[in-house]
Image (cartoon, rainbow, N blue to C red):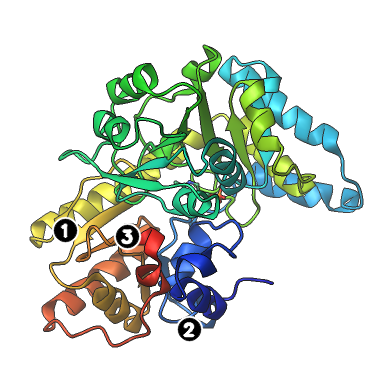
Amino acid sequence: MPISRRNFLRTAAAGTAAVATLPLLSEAHLAMAQRRTPRKADPAGSVRIDANENPLGPCAAACTSISGLIPEGGRYDSDLTGKLAEIFAAQEGLKPEYVSVYAGSSEPLHYSVLAFTSASRAYVTGDPGYEAGMLAAALNGAEVKKVPLTPTHAHDAKAMLAAAPMGGVFYICNPNNPTGTTTPREQIEYALANKPAGSILLIDEAYIHFSDAASAIDLVKADKDVIVLRTFSKLYGMAGIRCGLAIGRPDLLAKIAYYGMNPMPIMAVAAATASLRDPGIIAQRKAINAQIRTQTFEWLTANNYKFIPSESNCFMIDTGRPGHAVMSAMASENVYIGRVWPIMPTSVRITVGTAGDMAQFQTAFKKVMSAPAVAFTGPMPGQNRSRMLS
Ligand code: PLP
């Protein structure tokens, strides 16, 4: 059954048992669940900064490669997928068998959690953190341990290990969704050195290109119990095209492949390949994102709004009032901002959009925050009613 906003909310609202009937979930579903008005019905000119998408979309070379491949759409063409893995592996100094290609990183995230957690091996994550893995763990009958981030909003490796001495998956999102903050290498190394046997570190690098954080791919190269996730949905602007990678030792990748290996959409593979071959795209887009983010932070500071400085394409603002009410008031101004996490109920997540998006955001945010706070009267977002996510 396709997941519409209405049936997602109905199912999530029914609690743990019902969520167990849900398939793999991604940011798209989680953002939709807290949306007051379906975005497709939005009036023209709306600002969409609620799902960590990249408004720049795919690069020019990716667009050209997609259109050139349309006549080949009748073929599965697994060779193209193999070549993508080879190109990525060569760029990173890995053997190609250390790279598996998926239609986005949501799939390997979900499958890694299914493969390495169980009723006796918990899933351990930072809080606030990206929820997709928590839902997969609950589906698998595993305990979910949410460990608050440190005061600098990094993952607290020591506390994560203490929370589940027999954990199965220690999930570190670097930079983190939703805070956009990075976790220093020492924390990752501590977790690796002290984690229980048979467990993995699942390092989600969906946003790494926006930041200066060091990748953990070298730990994969060193044959450690580490799976790194990458996606083309963020810096490369391909969320709607779907391509992602799991990078790990072949025996670890085989364990997650057990849960599914669909033939890849060939246009996604071609666009990802063209993106990897674009020599300037990472530096250009990182600079664009940083420039707009810095300008936004300067404006927030000048206006005395509280935010967490981020190194990514999203950041949290503490509004000092119920976050859902602010989301709702912003939607009335035609600016769709991101989600609220239970541990930070007065904060909202904002995605860095275009300069024009952020100018509209500033006007709307000032208006909303200058008006007296009103109680949230919209439909209760499904996320708050789900036991896993509270
Ligand atoms: N990991 C994180 C931290 C994310 O925020 C997202 C999406 O927003 C994903 C993974 C999955 O992205 P996709 O399936 O589009 O690659």
Disc 1 or 2, which lies upstream in sequence?
A: 2
Question: What residue do we see at 17% from left, 52% from top?
Answer: 298
Looking at the image, is mark 3 or mark 2 earlier in the sequence?
A: 2
Is the C-beta separation of discs 3 and 1 under 8 Å? no
Residue ID at (47%, 39%): 120
Going by the numbered disc 2, the residue's amino acid type is: Pro
- What whole-number distance in Å separates the C-alpha atoms at marks 3 and 2? 20 Å
The numbered mark, 3 or 1, whose residue comes first in the sequence reads: 1
The numbered disc on residue 350 is 3
Q: Is residue 127 visible?
A: yes
Would you name the residue on which mark 1 appears?
300
Is 374 positioned to the left or the right of 76 in the image? left
Q: Which mark is residue 231?
A: none
Query: Residue 10: image x %, image y %?
Result: 50, 79
Residue at the far top in the pictured view: 222
Where disc 3 sits, the SS reads strand
Towards the viewer: 32 or 45? 32
Q: Quadrant of the N terminus?
A: bottom right
Return the residue nearer the eye: 231 or 145.
145
Find the distance from the CA under tag 3 to the CA under tag 1: 12 Å
Q: Secondary structure at mark 1?
A: helix
| Total count of labels | 3
According to the image, label 2 marks what residue? 43
